[in-house]
Image (tube, rainbow, N blue to C red):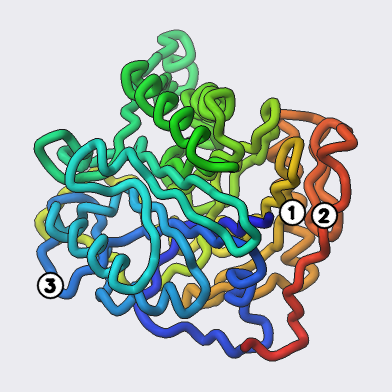
Amino acid sequence: MKIVLVGDTVLAREPAERRDDSALRILRTGDLTIANLEAPLVDTDHPTEKEMTIRLPTSTAVLLRTIGVDVVSLATNHALDHGAEGLLNTMRALDDAGIRHAGGGRTLAEADAGVVVDTASGGRVAVLSFCATLPPGANATEARPGVAPLRIDQSFSIDGTLLQEQPGTPPFVRSAAQETDVVRVENRVRAARSEADRVVACLHWGVPFAYLPPNQGPLAQYQQDLGRRLVDAGADVVAGTHPHCLHPVERWNDGLILYSLGNFLFHAGEVRRPDTYFGLPYRASRLFEATDWFDSAAFDVEMPPAGPPRLRITPITLDATGEPRLAAPAAAARIRALVERSSRELDPSVRVDPDGTVHFGGSPSTVAQMPQPTVDASSPAP
């Protein structure tokens, strides 16, 4: 069984799928395709008070189905950009289009529940979705709609001597997931493990590169411990989104932690900044200008009958419209090198082959060759 995982997706209009170099056909190469839906689907504009809001038309649900998406994760910091009714409207539109979804709900129990999907190959996959990047009031409770929360405690450390020598240095941010939430999510992963053959836990977490000092990145302090705990609870794959760039990959015991899938398709014109919001001058516009935003990948996860999942990445680049293209050779080499280099900071044994196969630690069960992808840039899209 092969699962295709892609990152942040903001699809506002029919994409140019029939270009020869379109990466959209990757979505149809697996038994199950999971994308992160980075915006609510609503036809009325009632934005909440925050730095950036996004809105997509309800017709996006049908487009997602048309291009090959089977399941979307909803637990994101933008899910309630247009209020609780916007989230519920999103869920209705996805249901009507036949797109399964996880991470949002009328109650906490519904948001936590996720979805179990029967694949064409006969396997059952549980998809869960949780959000660590929570605007105030976005978390579901037993009494209100929202997304499945995984809250983070933060504190700030300052070295007084260093600040005198290096004035202007930002504090170091210490972070840890709240234990009550971690235990709740671990229990949900264990329950999902009993319901399905494989479990994918989608996490909206981490820090976008425009907000993160280079000397503190790329991972926030809480991420590695949290990802490993979810693998130990039974997740085969922990799939991260939110930073809008590629982050390391890691094998932990018999699971994969993909710290950030990057962007997949992002019509950035749908991002709005309310005139009434006055935030700190973080220069967030750098998000939409840097190579980090445009260099990305699709992640093929092969689930063998026994043993840990195997990983292959297909480098992609977003064009000026925000749509994904199969990366040209030089860009593909750059993207593979980025994944390998950043991953080696966690595990020096990681190696990414020219075909995108990722090797961890030299284990025969892990480095066995995966089937070649069926994407062919020279043939027309269907």
* Badge 3 or badge 1: first in the primary sequence: 3
Q: Quadrant of residue 269?
A: bottom left
Residue designated by label 2: 370
Instruction: Assign a secondary structure to mark 2.
Output: loop
- Residue drawn at x 30%, y 35% is 149
* Badge 1 or badge 2: first in the primary sequence: 1
Name the mark on residue 44.
Answer: 3
Please rate how many residues cluster around mark 3, counting C-alpha atoms within 10 Å: few if below 14, some from 14 to 19, many from 20. Answer: few
| Residue 96, horizontal then vertical, whole percent | 28, 72
Circles 3 and 2: CB atoms closer than 8 Å: no
Please rate how many residues cluster around mark 2, counting C-alpha atoms within 10 Å: few if below 14, some from 14 to 19, many from 20. Answer: some
Viewer-nearest residue: 192 or 236: 192
Three-letter code for the amino acid on which mark 2 is drawn: Met
Please rate how many residues cluster around mark 1, counting C-alpha atoms within 10 Å: few if below 14, some from 14 to 19, many from 20. Answer: many
Name the mark on residue 312.
Answer: 1
Three-letter code for the amino acid on which mark 3 is drawn: Thr
| Residue 88, horizontal then vertical, whole percent | 18, 58
- Total labels: the figure holds 3
Q: Is residue 34 left or right of residue 52?
A: right
In this orientation, does residue 295 appear? Answer: no
**16 over 135 or under it: above or below:** below
What's the distance in space between the residues labelled 1 and 2, CA to CA? 8 Å
- Residue drawn at x 13%, y 69% is 45
The mark lying in front, picked from 3 and 2, is: 2
Instruction: Assign a secondary structure to mark 3.
Output: loop
In this orientation, does residue 205 appear? Answer: yes
Viewer-nearest residue: 4 or 21: 4
| Residue 262, horizontal then vertical, whole percent | 54, 54
**221 over 136 or under it: above or below:** above
| Residue 359, horizontal then vertical, whole percent | 82, 42
- Residue drawn at x 31%, y 28% is 151
